[in-house]
Image (cartoon, rainbow, N blue to C red):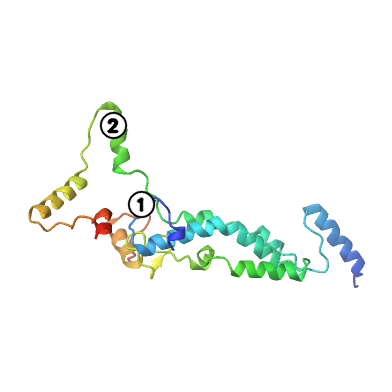
Amino acid sequence: MSVPRARLLALMKARCELFSTTYNPEGIRTGNKILRQKLKGPSFVAYYPRKITTFREFQDEFKSLELEIEDEDELDRLDHISELKARSKGAPKKKREKEIKKK
Amino acid sequence: MVLFRAKKFDLGCFTNIGIIRDHSKRKAFAAHEAERQALRYIIRNTTLPARTRAMAQLQLTQMHCYTRSTQINNRCILGGKSRGVFSDFKMTRYNFRLQALEGNLPGVKKASW
């Protein structure tokens, strides 16, 4: 026993009303599936871990209590640079713009 | 592209140029995702006039390549490598092995039977 098409369409319409979907018997492409997609951006951006605090900010936290914290890595770096400069092997000084213009 | 790079350095993992580039691509994609989806909707909607759909196609192709999701590539957060990266752990297979043997990855243990 075959069911007439009009009856099937009526069923489809009733179903669309019930579940609040759009009634589209011809199957026209309306691009709604793109509007239904979730945005991927937030999860993509969260891939790499972010910098939480810097040592400078940590130092500043204790400044109000008049406590000083030494940044050992920074001190090591400065020591290394002063050592190089003592042996005159340091990085050259930056050229001043005024001198260049005079020449 | 320097155009999309953050003004202030904001990464907390191993960094090299590849990671910085990929991170800025991710941020560019997130910023333009809504615009891209809107254009894609116009293109796919056959009830709209052909002219607007063609215009949308042109606009979508003329957007910067950094706003495309296919430009994004998962990289190792410990070494910056782009190949052999386990997406579950964000690490290359070798870094994953080292970390797993050290016991830094909860729930991972060496198989033995």
Amino acid type at circle 2 is Phe
Is residue B91 at least partly visible in the picture? no
Residue at 67 percent of width and 58 percent of height: A36
Q: Nearer the viewer, residue B101 or A33?
A: A33
**What residue occupies the far top of the structure in this picture?**
A65
Give the CA separation, mark 1 to mark 2: 23 Å
- Position of residue A92 relative to residue A64, above or below, is below
Q: Quadrant of residue A95?
A: bottom left
Task: Find numbered disc 1 in the image and state the secondary structure of the residue it sits on.
Answer: loop
A22 lies above or below B8: below
Q: Can you tell which mark lies on residue B109?
A: none
Amino acid under label 1?
Gly
Disc marking residue A62: 2
- Residue in the foreground of this view, choosing between A67 and B75: A67
Q: Residue at x 40, y 64 (%)?
A: B75
Left or right, B57 with reference to A57: right
The quadrant holding residue A56 is: top left
Q: Which residue is mark 1?
A: B12
